[in-house]
Image (cartoon, helix red, strand yellow):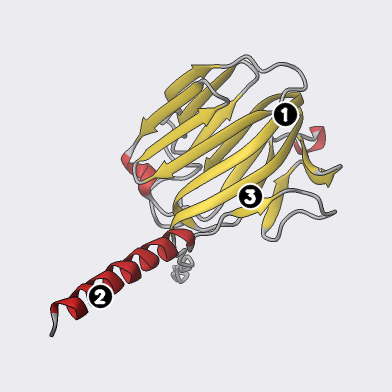
Amino acid sequence: MPLAHRIVLSVLAVALLTFAAGHSLSAAEPLIAKFDEAKRPEKWTVNFGHWEPKDGVLVCRQLDKDNHAAASRWQIPLKDAVIKLRLKFDGATGFHLGFDPAPGELKKEGHLYSLIVTPTQAQIKKHKDKADEASKDQTLATASLNAKAGEWIDIELRTEGEKVSVTIGKTAKLEASDPTFAVAKPTVVFRVIGGDVQLDDVQVTVLKAAEIKPVEKKAATKK
């Protein structure tokens, strides 16, 4: 084959590889919730509290009758992801962004870990095993905040393998790691403590998807 033809083929091969790489990187399009509609995004379910769009934001509120933190879950199965959102405290004392382990992934009961944000502080907390009375929550990272009334706070959380990193605003950064963090996660979990929180521009980019297997029910044994 003439040298000129080989050069042309080499250039085409490089171009195709470059296109393929760019295509794979853009394949994981972010899921974005802006709350301009009257309903929550599809597969965003409520466990406790008030989670309703109003005036282009999601109003999140703990209800006294629940005797439980306001809690909702956006059902996006994942292992690795980047979550971005805008948050404004409007009477609430705390906001959680976190995950649960998929069924069968760990020999524990309860949540996996959460980013816990208050107007004055942020923490990454590994949650206890509810099946073990001696187990306790573990605070893995802490950063100070100074959120003013009515101020929107930008949050970015990256969960990748065993590591989690968080950026809040332009200055606060937190990092933590734990072997259990690499498991499959069926949903993104949101919680609110106290009064109201407003959420907007919630964006989830899945870096590594997860296949969530249904839990097999054990057959009842005769006594």
Distance, label 1 to label 3, CA atoms, is 19 Å
Q: Residue at (43%, 43%) from the top-left corner?
A: 159
Q: Residue at (47%, 49%) from the top-left corner?
A: 81
Q: Nearer the viewer, mark 3 or mark 2?
A: 2
| Residue position for label 3 | 73
Secondary structure beneath label 2 = helix
Secondary structure beneath label 3 = strand
Q: Quadrant of the N terminus?
A: bottom left
Distance, label 3 to label 2, CA atoms, is 52 Å
| Residue position for label 1 | 88
Q: Residue at (42%, 54%) from the top-left corner?
A: 184
Query: Looking at the image, is mark 3 or mark 2 earlier in the sequence?
Result: 2
Above or below for 133 versus 47: above
Q: Report the disc number at residue 8.
A: 2
* Residue type beneath disc 1: Lys
Which residue lies most toward the bottom here?
A: 1
Q: Residues within 10 Å of mark 1 (few under 14, many from 20)?
A: many
* Residue type beneath disc 3: Arg
Q: Quadrant of the C terminus?
A: bottom left
Q: Residues within 10 Å of mark 2 (few under 14, many from 20)?
A: few
User: Residues at badges 1 and 2 in contact (C-beta under 8 Å)?
Assistant: no
Q: Nearer the viewer, mark 1 or mark 3?
A: 1
Distance, label 1 to label 2, CA atoms, is 56 Å
* Residue type beneath disc 2: Val
